[in-house]
Image (tube, rainbow, N blue to C red):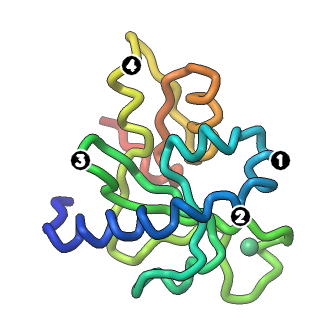
Amino acid sequence: MKLSKEQRQYLERAWETYAPNLGDAAGWLEGRGVDLGFAASRGLGVVRRPLPGHETAEGYLAIPYLTKAGPVNFNFRCIQDHNCKEIPNHSKYWRRKGSGVNIYGVQSIAWADDWIVVTEGEIDALIWQQIGVPALAVPGAENWKPY
Ligand SMILES: [Zn+2]
């Protein structure tokens, strides 16, 4: 999906808005073995004051899909200490409708040799990257295509 100039600016603004709040997720990240500094280096943040269209993600971890050209998408993950399935009208993950599906961690391709780890979740890919292993995430098992 090709992004318009306005879409790119929106994603840049979201990134700039959410990244400074990453400290809100420090405990959650630590509980999963993700170093806060490493998560910051990958542009993660927390949605405190959502941009229009991101209201559903308030309080969620913001996971930007970064490329050399900046963020091309976001996925958001609940970081509350509850079972998301027990909350009505609530999801563990949320992404903006129509935002499409991208591969997470494409910058790993630049430093991969002849193999790369592929995970389903972005956080799993981050954990691999953190220990120096090139890794991508393809969110949603149904998004893994034969090609
Ligand atoms: Zn939740």
Which amino acid lies under the numbered mark 2 shown in the image of this protein?
Asp
Query: For numbered disc 3, what is the local secondary structure?
Result: loop
Mark earlier in primary sequence (1, 2): 2
Mark 4 and mark 1: Cα distance apart in space: 28 Å
Q: Which residue is mark 3?
A: 69
**Which residue position is annotated with label 1?**
31
Position of 89 with respect to 134 (left or right) is: right
Q: Which residue is mark 2?
A: 24
Q: Earlier in the sequence, mark 4 or mark 1?
A: 1
Marks 3 and 4 sit apart, C-alpha to C-alpha, by: 17 Å
Q: Secondary structure at mark 2?
A: helix
Find ligand 1 in the image and state its quadrant. bottom right
Q: Secondary structure at mark 1?
A: helix
Badge 3 crowding class, 10 Å Cα cut-off, few under 14, some 14 to 19, many 20 or more, is: few
For marks 3 and 4, give the one nearer the viewer.
3
Res 106 → quadrant:
top left
Mark 4 or mark 2: which comes first in sequence?
2
